Amino acid sequence: MSGTFLGMPAFPAAARDAVADPTLRANLRHATHTIRDKRAKAVAELDDWARLREAGKRIKDHTLRHLDRYLVQLEEAVTAAGGVVHWAADAAEANRIVAGLVKATGEREVVKVKSMATQEIGLNEALAAEGITAYETDLAELIVQLGDDRPSHILVPAIHRNRGEIRDIFRDRMAAWGRAAPEGLSDTPGELAEAARLHLREKFLRAKVGVSGANFMVAETGTCVVFESEGNGRMCLTLPETLISVVGIEKVVPTWRDLEVFLQTLPRSSTAERMNPYTSTWTGTHDGDGPRVFHLVLLDNGRTDTLADEVGRQALRCIRCSACLNVCPVYERAGGHAYGSVYPGPIGAILTPQLRGTESEIDASLPYASSLCGACYDVCPVAIDIPEVLVHLRERVADRGGKGHRLEKAAIKAAGWVFDHPRALAAGERIASRTRAVHPSRIPGAGAWTEGRDLPVLPSEPFRDWWRKNRRNGADPAGLGVRGPVRASPDADAGRSDDRSGERPDGRPAVRSGDRVGDRPGDRAEDLSGERTSEKPAERKDGDV
């Protein structure tokens, strides 16, 4: 991935600063609650939602298993339709390809459809270095660009801004990028949208090159598909003479029939709409209809490495609906910027470390940016088990070592030795109990873990010492009604060694391994060999437990 966001502090430090911003938290709380409530109602309208979810999962899994075949089919279909396909192994190569294509047209500006892939590779910055200006045309992306900001949400990039802040950005920054904001601009949604429309219209009519991503690519026809809600995407896709689409290789689906599933699940999961307002499709080039030149840049940038991970590869199912962000309690409080990536929230916590690696501090911290509550899995329209992948990535980070993890490994190894040596364990327990008055409430050097946790207070004596004094000699300090030493009846001991591990405290024999769950001693149970047996509880004599 691009290094645009690298250099940020690890997630805990960034999140701590974000949580201290009351305006940010209020903006996030209002927006995420509104979106997720609407989504829940839209999804509840479909009786077959669970089946659609499973169908989406299976389509994506099938495609990923045969990705090589479908990508070749896609390339052949795009080429046959008049397009040109380019393969980019990483962000640097993708940026070189796009910059070269733009410069070949002689143009120095492009209009852009909202695209996560181009943000991932840092395309705007790469084009700027080549003297090319990229204009974002999505309203939220425009707000982010004018404010010299970064997106903080997959679906609503400016979710961290309120209307007053947006009005100030338009007033102060629009003139530097083109048409200035109208005089006396207020913060009403209608006026803000009109100011953006007037500002962008001149760019749509002037631009000769458009840049886009794609939500899906249909292998059988070479068709690219973009879902959007404003109509700006369609302007970018149809008005320019040259169209360059940068798309991750995981976005391919085999057929139009497969696309039909996502036409139902994506709008409801993202914008809570029954049907997407603007669904634009394009297949190669056509005389007199749309761009005369079409280039498709297929982006790997870590996706092949992710595909090789049997657990982590399910992150590539993601259709970028952002439902997981809107239900995540961590995202709601920390916001998207704390994740240090264009992919924030739960999906970013599992996708970014796989695409970018876990070598940097911020990337190594992302798998821990979760409470593992599982809400993200419940709402995912393609059933990505995000908690499973988070735990898997935590193991990967721990295996890499590092100061904290080396200490943890040493502690676990020492604990293992102690538990393997009962006498050492008993001695340690006695020492710990006798010195409990001077124990700290937190473990020295483990402040991050014990910041919200106190160490439990140790008892005055180890349990084994208490047992030896109070139970072996027949005492009953707990008032359990037990008198005399604990022993089983002679009948129960017949033919057995002195091991009483199979007894229950009340003297009844424990259920054997062959019994079915729920069988009681004395019932007929079927053992592992399939034979029917009859068991009777051992008879008790007076004084026996």
Image (spheres, helix red, strand yellow):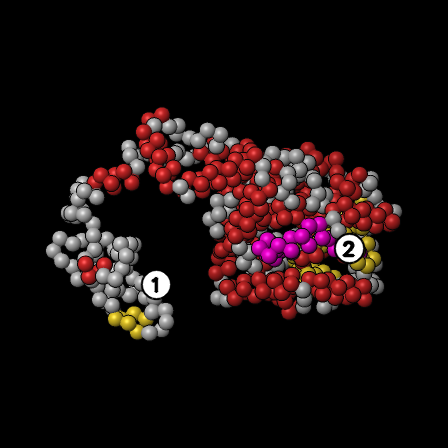
Please identify, in this view, whether the residue under mark 1 or under mark 2 is nearer the observer.
1
Q: Is residue 193 left or right of residue 331?
A: right
**First in sequence: mark 1 or mark 2?**
2
Q: Is residue 97 left or right of residue 360?
A: right
> Can you tell which quarter of the image residue 382 is in?
bottom right
Q: Is residue 158 left or right of residue 83?
A: left
Q: Is residue 320 above or below residue 474?
A: below
**Quick one: 438 or 153, which is closer to the camera?**
438
> Dot 1: within a 10 Å radius of its alpha carbon, few (fewer than 14), some, or many (20 or more) residues?
few
**Which of the image's four quarters has the N terminus?**
top right
**Quick one: 452 or 41, which is closer to the camera?**
452
Which residues fall within the magenta stretch? Answer: 295-319
Q: Which residue is mark 2?
A: 87
x and y percent of residue 508 in the render?
Answer: 22, 59
> Dot 2: within a 10 Å radius of its alpha carbon, few (fewer than 14), some, or many (20 or more) residues?
some
Regarding mark 2 in the picture, which secondary structure is present there?
Answer: strand
Cα distance, mark 1 to mark 2?
Answer: 58 Å
Mark drawn on residue 403: none
x and y percent of residue 5 in the render?
Answer: 66, 39
Q: Is residue 443 above or below residue 345?
A: above
In the image, farthest residue toward the left: 542
**Quick one: 184 or 93, which is closer to the camera?**
93
Q: Which residue is mark 1?
A: 513
Q: Is residue 477 left or right of residue 31?
A: left
User: Residue shown at 72%/65% (left/top)?
Assistant: 69
> Can you tell which quarter of the image residue 436 is in?
top left
